[in-house]
Amino acid sequence: MLKKRTKIYLLLAVFLLVVGGFFVWWWQGQQSQKKVDWDNPDYVFDIKIPDDFDQTKIDRVQLKITEARKAYAEKKEDNYTWDIIGNLYEFVRDYDRALVVYKKSFEMQPKDIIAILNIGTIYEEQKKDYKEAEKYYSQAVVIFPQMVDVYDRLANLYWHKMNQLDQAETTYIQGIEATSGKPDLIVSLINFYGQTEQIEKQKATAKKLLELYPDNELYKKDFGDLAK
């Protein structure tokens, strides 16, 4: 009797596994079909609000949905519309769909700084895919060679996430040259040298900063002793 009951339980377990597996396969198929349907507003605005959102964040989600729906209805072919939708997805932590629409925006407008930096940030901070983050930050450097922020992002990625100190240093120096000695990047390089214990280089860079900006009292206060 016991053996017969055990067989029944085993058969029931196998049946449940088969049914469960079929359901998962069907559900994944339905989801994959939805992911390509960007002309369907029901899919685009099918938003799942995270359970830990308080009322303030829920209200912000609703405002973002309203803004995104308006842009989608009026200017669906405008890349900025997809930036707005990507921001909505990112806010509710739907990073996979955020990446899809930011890339869509970037394809529509290859000089979309919002899209390319947000793609890099998601790969870096959420996906921990540092090679992909490097790819997009590097593209940003090529497209926007005068923008300080793109060098800072790429250098920090090399430094803090990829442990490629030589690449970080090279990126800072490249940025300083390309931006004609913008002080923010020089300060970043000084801090980089200090935290990586390259003291002689830190002193030389601090001296360069004060030579370029001799009247800046903050720089004299923070780096005057280093430059002596």
Image (tube, rainbow, N blue to C red):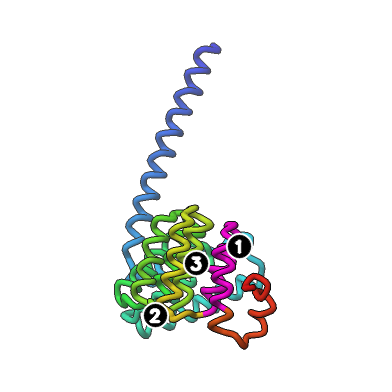
Quadrant of the snapshot with the C terminus: bottom right
Measured Cα–Cα span from mark 1 to mark 2: 40 Å
The residue beneath circle 1 is 194
- x then y, percent, for residue 25: 37, 44
Q: Quadrant of the N terminus?
A: top right
> What residue is disc 2 on?
80
**Which residue lies at the image location 34% right of the left edge and 51% below the top edge?**
29
* In front of the other: 80 or 227: 227
Precedes in sequence: disc 3 or disc 2: 2
Q: Mark 3 and mark 2: span between their CA atoms?
A: 15 Å
Residue contact between numbered discs 3 and 2, judged by CB atoms under 8 Å: no
User: In the image, what residue type sits under mark 1?
Assistant: Gly
Q: Residue at x 35, y 68 (%)?
A: 139
Foreground of the two, 136 or 55: 136
Q: Secondary structure at mark 1?
A: helix
- Name the residue located 51 percent from the left edge and 63 percent from the top edge: 156
Left or right of residue 214: residue 140: left
Q: Left or right of 225: which side holds 188?
A: left
**Camera-side residue: 132 or 149?**
149
Picture coordinates of residue 79 (x, y %)? 35, 78
The quadrant holding residue 52 is bottom right
Helix, strand, or loop for circle 3? helix
Which residue is tagged 3? 90
* Residue 6 place in picture, x, y as percent: 52, 18
The magenta segment is 183-209
Q: Based on the displayed image, in which of its 4 quarters is residue 120 positioned?
A: bottom left
Say if the magenta span includes residue 191: yes
Q: Amino acid at mark 3?
A: Glu
* Distance of label 1 from label 3 (alpha carbons): 35 Å
Q: Earlier in the sequence, mark 1 or mark 3?
A: 3
Instruction: Name the residue type under label 2.
Output: Tyr
Q: Residue furthest bottom?
A: 215
